[in-house]
Amino acid sequence: MDRARPVTVRRSREPALWLLFSAGGTLAALGLPAVVFVLWVGPAVGWVAVPPHGTLSALLGGAGVRLVLFVVIALALYHWAHRFRYTLYDGLQLYHLHQLIATLTYGVATLLTVASAMVLFL
Amino acid sequence: MTNPAYRRFHPRWHRARIPIFWWLRKLSYTRFIVRELTSVCVAYTAILLLVQVWMVDAGPDRFERFTAWLASPVVTGVHVVVLVGLLFHTLTWLHLAPRALILRVGRWRVPGAAVLAGHYAAWLAVSGGVLWIVLGR
């Protein structure tokens, strides 16, 4: 009886975590290559103009852009947490550390989500 | 996780030892682990995007220093690797979509090729939107 309880708790959380993983994966797949290209790789190799401070500052002036960035950043972080957690289990055979790994990955994602809310909205 | 103390009288499990680099043995295994590791590129992009917002908010001087850092060859090299990782994530993610998403219109099932095409169209639209928002003003 006692042994069954932790298993049901873990199972009930899994669909919610998977939903975050899946939503983050979709947003990352659709949006992030263009972001990395237009902001970092493109300007560095000279294919697109370096976005000036004024442009980005004006862009971030609206609450809408900040809200979109918050959603994308937070979901991308939970996507990483979920996927990286299973990579550690499978790739490095660390099944015995599953509690610690889950705490660390989702903990880091949660801390960085709080940090992103502070940077974006405070 | 059960308390290890409860396992004192449990017979030993038979488990073959698997080396840590088991996934280098076969191309499909390596591809699987590389796909999983693209999540590191996703997290890196999210964090650097946040840093960029922070630098923009900090004013033109800090932003100039950040831009100079972005232009350095080593950082650019890292970002090319990140971009390749993200593209691998996008391609593998889009190609899983038809298997993960079963769409029905009435009793007719939308074929996988159409679901895939829809996802590619969405990728194109979002990418175009990002380029337009940053460059088109």
Image: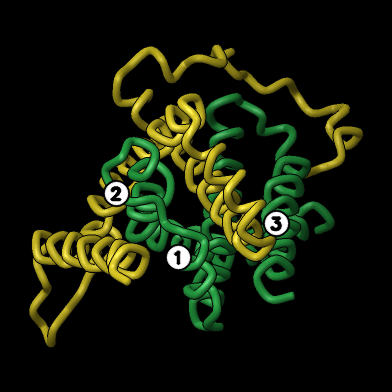
Q: Which mark is residue B15?
A: none
Question: What residue is at 35 percent from the left and 47 percent from the top?
Answer: A37
Q: Measure the C-alpha gap from mark 1 to mark 3.
A: 17 Å
Same chain, marks 1 and 2?
A: yes
**For residue B123, which quarter of the picture?**
bottom left
Number of numbered discs on residues? 3
Q: Position of residue A98 (x, y in %)?
A: 71, 40
Amino acid type at mark 1: Ala
**For residue B44, which quarter of the picture?**
top right
Q: Position of residue A44 (x, y in %)?
A: 39, 38
Q: Chain of mark 3?
A: A
Question: What residue is at 16 percent from the left and 65 percent from the top?
Answer: B121
Q: Which mark is residue A23?
A: 1
Q: Position of residue B126 (x, y in %)?
A: 29, 66
- Classed neighbour count for the residue bearing mark 2: other residues with Cα under 10 Å, few (<14), some (14–19), many (≥20): some
Q: Is residue A8 visible?
A: no
Q: Earlier in the sequence, mark 3 or mark 2?
A: 2
Colour displayed for chain B in the image of the structure: yellow
Residue nearest the observer in this picture, A103 or B2: A103
Residue nearest the observer in this picture, B99 or B134: B134
Tell which tag, 1 or 2, sits nearer the viewer.
Answer: 2
Q: Which mark is residue A48?
A: 2
Q: Earlier in the sequence, mark 1 or mark 3?
A: 1
Q: Earlier in the sequence, mark 1 or mark 2?
A: 1
Amino acid type at mark 3: Leu
Q: Which mark is residue A112?
A: 3
- Classed neighbour count for the residue bearing mark 1: other residues with Cα under 10 Å, few (<14), some (14–19), many (≥20): some
Colour displayed for chain A in the image of the structure: green
